[in-house]
Amino acid sequence: MPDIYGLILETLRRHLGTRAEAVLEEGLKRLGKRQEELSPEDGETLLKGLAFRELQARLPAKEAKRVVEEALQKLSAPSEPADLEALEAGLKRFGLYLDWPEVARYRALVNRLRQNPDPRLMWEAKALLEALEEKLEEALLRQAKDLAHLEESLERVRHLGGPKVRRLEKLGETVREAQKEGLLAQAEVERARSLALELRKLLESSVARPPTLPEIVFETQEKPPEDVFLSVEEAEEPEGELVVDLEALPEEAARRLEALEVEEEGRRLEELLARHAHLLQEPTVSPLLAEVQALLEAGKPAGEKLSLLEAALKEAEANLRAEKKARLIQLEARLRTLPLPEEAKASLEAALALAEETLREGGLPDLKPLEEELARLAAEARRQEEERRKLEAEMEALARELAAKGEAFAPLLEELRAVPLEALPQRLPEIKARYAALLMTQGEEAALRAKIKEAEEELKALRPEALALGLWESLEKAEEALAKGELPDLAALRREVAQAREAARQEALEELSRMEALAERFLGFGGEGVLRLIAEEKAKPLPDPTPVARALQALKRRLEAKREEVLTRLTALFQAYEGLEGFQSETHRRLRPLLQFLQSAKERLPRLGPKGLAQVEKTLAEAESLLEGLKREAEAAKSILKEIQGADLEALLGVFEEKPPLDLDRFRLPGVEALGFLEESPPLPKEALQELKRALEPLRGLFQEEGPVALLLGQKALVLAPFSGRTLVALMEPGALSAFLLKLSS
C-alpha cells in the first residue's frame, strides 16, 4: 500500500506550502486516525473534501480539480491489477453461496470490472467484499454454535446406537471439516440438527411412535441384571419424523420435549432473521413474526406459525424482486425521455444495466441511488430548459433595445436575429460586448453605465457562492471586464456556478452513499444515529460528509473497545473454568457447548463485525451465568466431601451383587451398576449411606423442590433420589448419569 499521508502531503505542499501540514493534521483529527492508519478510502475522503476546498481558495477551480484527480490516480492506479485479482479470488470463494443476494451483486460488479475498470465500481466491489467477509464470519460463528450443539446432542444419544446415530456422527464430521476450512455446510447442518432433535425426542420420551414403526428391541441375556443393554434395531430407517404423543407422557417429560422443540425453532427463527433482515417490516411478515417471537419467548413451540412465517418471507422476497424489476423498467423508460445528450445519460444507463444484471444473478439491487440520479438528471434538464428560456428572453430584450436605437444599430440587430438557438450561449455575450462598444461610439455613455451598474450588482450577488465553489478565474475575468467598462458574460458565470454547485453536491452525495453502506453494517451498534445524520446531510443544498466520517470513525473506535472488552471477559471465563473441568453435572453439560463455541469465537474475534460481536457477547453472558452456577455446585460438593470425609469411602464404592426389586429393572441402563432402596436392602453399606444422607440435609435449602442428588466419588457417580416414598440408591459410571436422571424424572 502506498504512503497515503506522504502522497497527499507532497501533492498539497506544491500549492499550499507550509499550510499543507496544518490541513492534513485537521483532516486526521476529523477522521480520528494517525498517519500510518490512513487507507486509500481515507485518502480519497481527504482529497475530495478538506484538501479540495483549500486548493479552491488558492487555485482556479479547474486547476484544483486537476490536482485532486492526479493525486487520486496515484492512490488507485498502481494497485488496479492486484485489486481485480483480489476481487476474482473473492468471487471464487463466495460464489458457493448462491442464496446470498450480496453475492449476486458482487458477481455483476466483477463482470463489469473485467470489461471496463471503473474507480467507483471498484470501490463498491471492495466494500462489498469486505461486507461479505464480515457476513461469512458471522455465519461461521453460527455454524460453530450449531456444531457445539450437535456434539453435545451426540454425546447424549450415542448410547442408543443404530444407523441414525452413525449418520449423525458422519454429518458432524462433515460440518467439523467444513468449519476448519472456513466453509459453510448449511445443508449438512440442517440435516444434522433435524436428526439430533429426533434422537433427543427418542431419548427423552418413553412413549414414542415413528410412522413406519421399526421395532425397538430390548436385548437381554441370562446374566446378572447389570448386563442389560438398550439398542435400536439396525433395520431400514423409518420415513418421516418421529411422532411423540405428548399426552401419553408424564408432565415433566412432555415439558422437556417441548423445550427441545422451542430451542430448535428458536434456531430456525434466528436463521430466518439473518437471511431475510430486509423483509421483516413487510406487512405480510411483521404480524406473523411478532406471533412467533411471543410464542417462543413464552416457552411454547410456534409450530405451524413458524412455517407460515417462512412461507410469508419467501413470498415477500418474490414480490420484492418483481417490484424492483418493474421499477427498473420505469427508470429506463423515464431516462429515455429526458431531453439530454446521450453522453449525459450514459453513466446512469450503465448503472441501470448493472442493476438489471444483479437482479438476473439473484440479487436485490438498491434502486434508491439510481432514482436519486435520475431525479438529478431531470433537474439538470429543467435547469437547461430554464437557461435556454432566459437566453431567449435576453435575446428578445436586446433585440427590442437595438431596434429602438435606430439605423446605426440595425446591422447588429440583424446579426442577432440570425444566430441559431444552439449557438446563442456563445454568440450572445459577443454581441453584447459589441453593443457596449457601439454605445460608446454613439455617445450613449449613460446607457452603458446603467448596464455596467446592473452587471456589478448581479456579480456582487454571485460572488460569495462562486468563491465558495472555487470559481476564482471566472470571477476575475468578469471583474476585469467591468473595470474596462465592458459588459461581462454573467449568463456564462451563472451556468458555471450552477454546474459547480451540482458537481459538488453530487460528489458529496456519492461519498455519503458509500458511508451509508458502512453505517448499515453498524445497525444495532449505533449505526442508526449515523444513518439519521446522513439523511440530514443529504437534505442540505450542499452536503458535508465530514461530520459523518467523524461519527463513523467514532463507531469504529467503539467497536474496537467492545472487542477488547469481550476478549478480556473471554480470557477471564476460560481461566475461571480451568479448575472445574472434572466436575460433572447437568450445568456442566449445558456449559460445555457454549465454551466450545466461545473458544471458536475467540479465534475469530479480530474479524467479527458488530453483529457477530453482539452474538458472542450474548452467549458469553449465558456462559458466565452457568459458570457461576457450576462454581456454586462445586463448592457445595466440596462441603459434602468435608462432612463425610470420615466415612468409609471404600465401603461406599464397593458393589454388592444383590439383585434389586423387580420394579427397578427399567432403571438398569448401560453403565448403571447397582440399585436399591436405602430403607430396605441398599446395594451399598447402609450406615455409610445414612451418614451421607444426613450430611446432605443442610443443602436442602439450596433447592426449590426435593429431588435427586448426584455425587461424583472417584470414577463412580452415586445418586440418592426420593422414589415411591423411599430413597433410591444407584451407583453408575459418570457417563450414564444424565440418561439415568432423565429416566428417573419420566
Image (cartoon, helix red, strand yellow):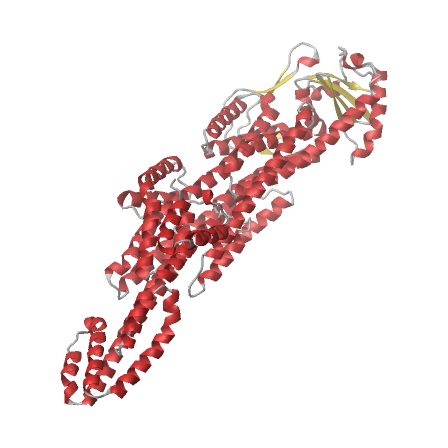
> Considering depth in this image, is 744 or 600 the residue closer to the camera?
600
Residue 200 figure quarter: top right
Q: Quadrant of the C terminus?
A: top right
Q: Is any part of residue 389 visible from this angle? A: no
Count of all numbered marks drawn on residues in the image: 0
Q: Is residue 15 left or right of residue 219?
A: left
> Considering depth in this image, is 337 or 87 the residue closer to the camera?
87
As drawn, 248 above or below 422: above
Residue 390 figure quarter: bottom left
Residue at figure coordinates x 23%, y 72% from the top left: 425
> Considering depth in this image, is 360 or 739 the residue closer to the camera?
360
Q: Quadrant of the N terminus?
A: top left
Q: Is any part of residue 642 visible from this angle? A: yes
Residue 374 figure quarter: bottom left
As drawn, 163 above or below 275: above
Q: Position of residue 514 (x, y in %)?
A: 42, 52
> Considering depth in this image, is 325 or 117 the residue closer to the camera?
117
Q: Is residue 442 left or right of residue 574?
A: left
Q: Position of residue 366 (x, y in %)?
A: 40, 53
Q: Position of residue 520 (x, y in %)?
A: 48, 50
Q: Position of residue 172 (x, y in %)?
A: 51, 27
